[in-house]
Image: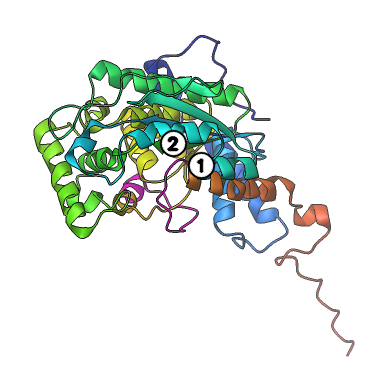
Amino acid sequence: MISQAISFNMQPITLAQAIARVAPADAEARRRAEARQLRLTKPPGSLGRLEQVSVQLAGIFGTENPRIRGKAVIVAAADHGVVAQGVTGYPQAVTGQMVQNFLEGGAAVSALSRLLGVRQIIVDAGVASGIQDHPDLRRLSSGHGTGDISRGPAMSTRQAQQCLTAGVNLAVEAARSGADLIAMGDMGIGNTTAASAIAATVTAKSARETTGRGTGRTPDELEHKVEVVQRALTVNRPDPDNPLDVLAKVGGFEIGVLAGVVLGGSAMRRAVVLDGFISGAAALLALLLCPATRDYMIASHRSDERGHQVILTHLALSPLLDLRMRLGEGSGAVLAMPIIEAASACLCEMATFDEAGVSDRDQNEAPAESPSR
């Protein structure tokens, strides 16, 4: 059981309330976890990244025994007006069709979630096409797709705030339902274009450095996509010091929801597991809104999308996996969850040298008596 989870009342909370409740990770709990790692029956550092993750979990949960009870992935879907510029090879209708696929359990993230015991939370954050009602679908739509960012803003500031607030409350709800690991997933034809624009703005890199193949662009098509991203930046001039402005001008509804998930998960002292490029762009916005959220982020994997490494470097995060994935959906984040659970189990369940009666390397036998003369 998490010892220092924040208790909200059952009313939805505002964006400002969530930000105010995000505290840095517990430094004392981290120190105790580090000390326990040194006493466990293994050479120091021999479990590598598992040890680092376990110490991070201790700081997040506020205890040297950071046990994980439940896992959830929040998959937010929305459409993007910039698809009109030919930046993707898939029709916009695929977004809504894939949401239906999530709900029916046929997507990669669905298969992985079933296998690994992860609860799926599927969110219509602004899909253009109609989606059939389903008991597992959360409708939080701020509109039927964003505006074309190569011609003007993606959304209004009010819509950006709505998306962030919705994401906050989704994460709070997941935490209250027992999720200690909250993963982020996305679906949205055209969303790598928006993510590229966000990454370029926040990291001060060029559009060429942050724009990748997305759903599979040829070299000529990639060049066109870079030009569209640069046009979006030139037309909108997003303010890199104002995350709401960045989201409203060049973002996406689902990206705003996922940025809110980072804030809400952090406010509830839960570990937020980032997926790939799109959730990384959302994390950039969350970090600008509240720098303390950095303590709660775990990078699941390194996407094969070009701009993802730019984002990871800016966030100072090292991913757990590198499988050349670039699917999205939360697939990489869900796949990394058992590794995070393994880190927790080793810290909490391994015996110390004293408990196991095993000699530590620093325990020397008493010196033999000198022979009599």
Q: Residues within 10 Å of mark 2 (few under 14, many from 20)?
A: some
| Front residue (pair 37, 93) | 93
Main secondary structure along the magenta-highlighted residues: loop
The circle drawn on residue 12 is: none
* Residue reaching furthest to the right: 372
Q: Which residue is mark 1?
A: 107
The CA distance from mark 1 to mark 2 is: 8 Å
Which quarter of the figure is the N terminus placed in?
top right
- The residue drawn where x is 53% and y is 22% is 134
Residue 318 colored in magenta in the image:
yes
Tell me where the magenta segment starts and ends, as one range: 311-330
Q: Which amino acid, by three-letter code, is at mark 2?
A: Met
Res 74 seen here: no
Res 79 seen here: yes
Q: Secondary structure at mark 2?
A: helix
Q: Which amino acid, by three-letter code, is at mark 1?
A: Ala
Ranked by sequence position, the earlier of labels 1 and 2 is: 2
Where is residue 41? Give x, y as percent: 73, 59
Query: Do the numbered discs 1 and 2 sit on residues whose CB atoms are within 8 Å?
Result: yes
Q: Which residue is mark 2?
A: 98
Q: From what the image shows, is residue 12 above or below residue 233?
A: above
Q: Quadrant of residue 148?
A: top left
* Residue reaching furthest to the bottom: 373
Q: Secondary structure at mark 1?
A: loop
* Count of numbered marks: 2
Q: Quadrant of residue 136?
A: top right
Q: Quick check: 38 left or right of 310?
A: right
Q: Quick check: 252 left or right of 52?
A: left
| Front residue (pair 152, 359) | 152
Q: Quick check: 208 left or right of 187?
A: left
